[in-house]
Image: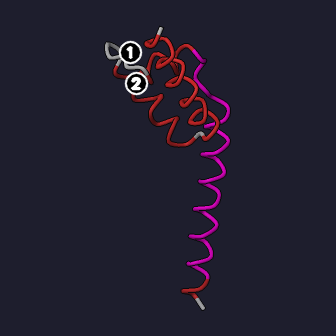
Amino acid sequence: MLVILVLLVIIIFVSVLNILSEILSKSKCPDASTLKRVVLGRARNSPGLVSSVQKHLGRCEKCRSKIDGIVNGAKNEMEI
């Protein structure tokens, strides 16, 4: 019985952490220009910024979806 209780507490704890992570990732999205600088490698002189944006991208699907547009836009600029 104690094992079941411990497992339930662990499951609830993990669920709460996932919810909090989701909330935090959506509330602190980098602005478009910062996201573009990091994705295109133009922020190499700011390793802290790069690291925080990379961590954010690991949690935020909305920002990850913006990356395709950034990359495609950069490809179009190179073709001109």
Q: How many marks?
A: 2
Which numbered disc covers residue 9?
none
Q: Main secondary structure of the magenta part?
A: helix
Above or below: residue 45 compared with residue 67: above
- The answer to whether the residues at label 2 and label 1 have Cβ atoms under 8 Å apart is yes
Which residues, given as a range, are shown in magenta?
5-32
Which numbered disc covers residue 43?
1
Task: Give the camera-side residue of 23 and 59.
Answer: 59
Residue at left 51%, top 36%?
57
Question: Which element is circle 2 on?
Answer: helix
Q: Distance between the residues labelled 2 and 1?
A: 7 Å
Which numbered disc covers residue 50?
2
Name of the residue lying farthest toward the top: 80
Question: Which element is circle 1 on?
Answer: loop
Above or below: residue 80 compared with residue 54: above
Q: Is residue 26 magenta?
A: yes
Task: Give the camera-side residue of 17 and 53.
Answer: 53
Name of the residue lying farthest toward the bottom: 1
